[in-house]
Amino acid sequence: MDGLAHPSLVPLATVVAAAERRPLQEALRQAQGNCQEAARRVGVSRASFYRKLQRYRLLEAASCAPDAPGGPSWPARRSAPCSTV
């Protein structure tokens, strides 16, 4: 094996990112932008959910985004204890 990806194959990281991004988007939509509820729906902690939102650049779609109306500021959210969902 030469260690190079086969030209017709999609990199695994791309496949994993797409597979993870879709449920996050759907959970946010169903929870109407409520990150705590969306995290519960996908079965991860709120802190993990925020990290995933940042990784896939979905944070701006959530009402928990730092600049969202009524959303907490990032430092306040970061210092607040995260509950496990």
Image (cartoon, helix red, strand yellow):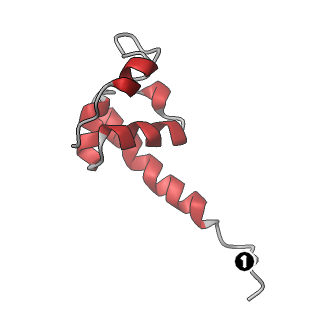
**Residue located beneath label 1 in the image:** 6
Residue at x-position 33% and y-position 34% = 29
Q: What type is the residue that disc 1 sits on? A: His
Above or below, 7 against 17 in this view is: below
x, y (%) of residue 53? 46, 38
SS at mark 1 in the image: loop
Q: Which of 74 and 41 is in front in this view?
A: 74
Q: Quadrant of the C terminus?
A: top left
Question: Position of 22 compared to 44: left or right?
Answer: right
Does residue 63 appear in the picture of this structure? no
Residue at x-position 72% and y-position 75% = 5
Residue 49 location, quadrant:
top left
Residue at the farthest top position? 69
Does residue 83 appear in the picture of this structure? yes
x, y (%) of residue 16? 51, 60
Q: Quadrant of the N terminus?
A: bottom right
